[in-house]
Amino acid sequence: MKIRKRNLALGLGLGALGLGFYINRQCFYAKEKKITLYSPKIDSPIKITHITDFHSNVLSNLGEVIENIRQFDPDFIILTGDILDYGTDRKIDRSLFFLKHLSSLGIETFYITGNHEEIGPNLDYFLEELEKLGIKYLKNESVLVKDNKINLYGNTFYTRSFDKYKKYEDKLNIILSHYSKHVRDRENVDFDFVFSGHTHGGQVRFPILGALVSPGEGFFPSFDKGVYPYRNGIIYVDSGLGNTFLPLRFLNKIGYSNIEIKNGSVV
């Protein structure tokens, strides 16, 4: 009887250690996702690195992440909000540590704010530091990139506005919105691509069922992770490079997306 109890305790202990190791790998070792999208509006491929929802994380494989992006050699990098979890000194330092390594690549980088940055303190200081790193903050405004072939528009979370947004027929129109629903709710906003985050893919996912719940999308969510044809364009939702509330991920490893847009039909 004692031997059985000891074996049971040993088995439970090993199981707990294994689960802890698995969750640690899910939460702190970033996965590179290679995504291919299509548009008939381009002649030559466009490469974009998409990073979202970093939440002041600590990456155990930071060097690998930076090297993968270097080798992918994107035309530009997009940061779609919640890169900063909350504006404490410690969390600002964590986010800037990551962004300094990212900016060392010398690749043009664009940033929009998410809900966590906007509700926290010291956002002005954080934005000043981003400017020093050469990261461009898009505050409900557009910029033309890639030899003026791409119209890149970024909006804020709580004070979002599309007043300055214009779709060009002769350019690729990309909207950066931390939460894709902010674009989906605007019937008069047309686009080629929307890149978003916010949902974390639910953080915890299950086979077949997917995410049970995600921020803003509710239970058994749609638009929580992946590629979605919408109206005349495509919405891509990345599940994020960090965690919120608890470092908890299951079947949904933290990651970032290296995206190539090629010539072809949207779907």
Image: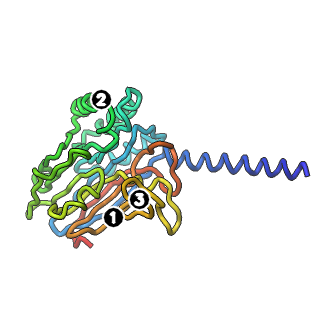
- Residue indicated by mark 1: 227
What type is the residue that disc 2 sits on?
Asn
- Residue in the foreground of this view, choosing between 110 and 179: 179
| Residue visible at 23% across and 48% down in the picture | 76
Split into 4 quadrants, where in the image is the C terminus? bottom left
Tell which of 106 and 57 is nearer to you.
57
Residue at image x 45%, y 37%? 58
Q: Quadrant of residue 95?
A: top left
Which of the two discs, 3 and 1, labels the residue nearer the N terminus? 3
**Label 2: which secondary element:** loop
- Tell me which residue sits at (24%, 30%) in the image: 124
Pointer 2 local density, CA inside 10 Å: few below 14, some 14–19, many at least 20: some
Name the colouring of the figure: rainbow
> Mark 1 or 2 closer to N-term?
2
Q: Are marks 3 and 2 in contact (CB under 8 Å)?
A: no
Amino acid at the residue labelled 1 = Val
Q: Based on the displayed image, in which of its 4 quarters is residue 111 positioned? A: top left
Residue 218 is tagged as 3
Which residue is labeled 2 in the image?
A: 122
Q: Is residue 117 above or below residue 198?
A: above
Going by the numbered disc 3, the residue's amino acid type is Gly
Of pointers 3 and 2, the one earlier in the residue sequence = 2
Query: Residue 241, percent across and down?
Result: 40, 47
Q: Determine crowd level at label 1: few under 14, some 14-19, many 20+ residues with C-alpha closer than 10 A.
A: some
